[in-house]
Image: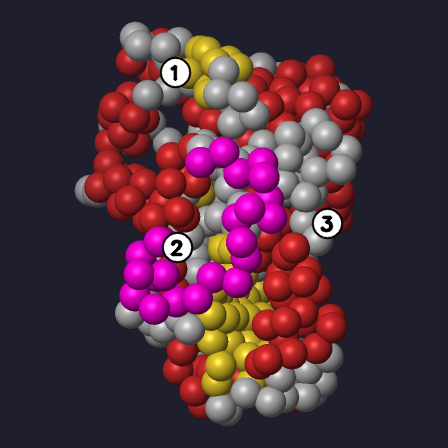
């Protein structure tokens, strides 16, 4: 098998290399997971919850090493300290609601009948995780899947090969059996073959639209349910009554944090004409205050993109937009660390429209286009003019207005006066080419369990 190499965006070196499992070894790993599932599900719920929480606690103990490894693997500056806040909050919330969510729903318990609906673990859950938030995106499914009584096989992105190893190390150290949670390295062919052979009972994939389509093709005819979180082009809308400074600060952070490599990052902004000039001026100043540099430099607020080929996509989109009439407001010379490779200067574009790829296709980098709108109707039309639907951010002072506008937007989550955030109590879901299914909230447990009805008659 050809080794899979992790090329660090920090310096272009080979940071890690792993040989993927052979097809037979991969089948054996899945067989071990299936053999272990019934025993794991038979353990008391409280025990499974305790072991999962202990695994996350062990992960927290590894923080200094993990933060450094993340910088090497995908370029996030060490000053941001990893993903532990979200990991801990999501684990705690899903643990708190597990008993109530998974408890049987009793319809009747009389001297003649006992009728109830139960939730049963699906079996073996396969997680195909992305590199941009490699711990958080895994935890979203890993925690509820294990708590609900499933075994889990994790395949991490090649850009973050070490993340799966750290997760497995932490959970095994906490007492989760090795066969209950396995990290594997697989190539695409073996991955698709396993899915096509009904090796798994649920496949959770976070990644590109093309990757999601490949998962669906592999699963065709197997009736294996997929959960897919794919591309995004999330909009922000700044109404005339918005708090301008708050809108600039949050939307620009949503556009630029993690070098723009956020599933729900802000990629396009629509501003009411009365605030447009002031918003653009403040947005440019906000971006110019960023420091692009080596992620180990404590002054760096923007690191390299995870791979130079990802940066090329953004550069190409910007160049095409400028050639078509867009105006770039950031001089790349302001960010001397831009090396034409993974280190990419952030950019703000105006004079953009929806004929440009930068406003229609996922960029997943530190660039945002800003358009002027005259009213809510125009903003709604433009926000919906997208093949994606993950989140939308509305800036207004009125709850009812935000909700009314939100009801007209084709998306999975509506934010008012915030962006780029996951609330573990709310379902993380999308529509259109962003995919299907949902994680977190009580619905996250429903994704990794199935209903089972009991109709018990006394004779």
Which residue lies under the disc numbered 3? 93
The front one of 72 and 44 is 72
Label at residue 61: none
- Span shown in magenta: 318-340
Residue 4 is marked as 1
Q: Which mark is residue 318?
A: 2
Circles 2 and 3, Cβ within 8 Å, touching? The answer is no
225 relative to 242 in the view: left or right: left
- Marks 2 and 3 sit apart, C-alpha to C-alpha, by 40 Å
Q: CA distance from mark 2 to mark 1?
A: 31 Å
Percent position of residue 326, x then y: 39, 67
Circle 1: element type = strand
Query: Which circle's residue, 2 or 3, is located before the other in the chain?
Result: 3
What residue is shown at x 48% (from left), y 14% (from top)? 14
Residue 410's place in the image compared with 372, above or below, is above
- Quadrant into which the N terminus falls: top left
Residue 386 appears at what percent x and percent y? 36, 68
* Secondary structure category for the residue under label 3: helix
Indicate whether residue 450 is drawn in magenta.
no
């Amino acid at each position: 098998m050809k080794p899979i190499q992790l090329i660090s965006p920090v310096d272009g070196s080979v940071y890690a290399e792993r040989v993927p499992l052979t097809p037979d070894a991969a089948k054996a790993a899945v067989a071990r997971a299936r053999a272990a599932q019934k025993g794991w599900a038979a353990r008391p719920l409280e025990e499974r919850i305790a072991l999962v929480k202990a695994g996350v606690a062990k992960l927290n103990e590894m923080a200094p090493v993990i933060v450094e490894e993340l910088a090497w693997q995908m370029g996030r500056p060490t000053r941001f300290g990893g993903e532990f806040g979200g990991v801990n909050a999501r684990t705690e919330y899903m643990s708190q609601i597990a008993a109530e969510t998974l408890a049987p729903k009793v319809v009747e318990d009389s001297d003649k009948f006992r009728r109830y609906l139960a939730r049963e673990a699906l079996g073996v859950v396969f997680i195909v995780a992305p590199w941009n938030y490699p711990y958080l995106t895994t935890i979203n499914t890993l925690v509820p899947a294990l708590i609900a009584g499933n075994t889990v096989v994790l395949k991490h992105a090649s850009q973050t090969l070490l993340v799966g190893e750290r997760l497995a190390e932490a959970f095994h150290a906490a007492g989760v059996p090795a066969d209950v949670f396995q990290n594997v390295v697989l190539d695409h062919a073996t991955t698709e073959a396993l899915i096509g052979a009904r090796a798994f009972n649920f496949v959770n994939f976070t990644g590109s639209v093309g990757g999601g389509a490949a998962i669906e093709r592999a699963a065709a005819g197997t009736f294996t349910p997929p959960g897919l979180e794919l591309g995004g082009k999330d909009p922000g809308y700044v109404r005339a009554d918005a708090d301008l400074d708050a809108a600039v600060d949050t939307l620009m952070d949503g556009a630029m944090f993690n070098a723009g490599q956020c599933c729900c990052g802000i990629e396009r902004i629509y501003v009411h004409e009365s605030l447009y000039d002031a918003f653009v001026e403040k947005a440019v100043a906000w971006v110019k205050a960023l420091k692009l540099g080596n992620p180990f430099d404590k002054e760096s607020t923007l690191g390299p993109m995870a791979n130079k080929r990802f940066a090329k996509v953004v550069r190409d989109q910007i160049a095409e937009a400028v050639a078509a009439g867009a105006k770039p407001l950031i001089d790349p010379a302001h960010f001397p660390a831009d090396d034409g490779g993974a280190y990419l200067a952030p950019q703000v574009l105006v004079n953009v429209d929806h004929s440009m790829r930068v406003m229609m296709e996922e960029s997943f980098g530190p660039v945002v286009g800003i358009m002027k709108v005259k009213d809510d109707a125009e903003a709604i039309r433009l926000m919906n003019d997208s093949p994606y639907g993950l989140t939308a951010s509305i800036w207004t002072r009125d709850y009812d207005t935000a909700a009314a506008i939100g009801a007209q937007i084709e998306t999975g989550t509506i934010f008012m006066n915030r962006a780029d955030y996951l609330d573990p109590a709310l379902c993380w879901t999308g529509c259109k080419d962003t995919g299907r299914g949902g994680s977190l909230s009580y619905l996250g447990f429903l994704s990794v369990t199935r209903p089972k009805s009991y109709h018990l008659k006394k004779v």
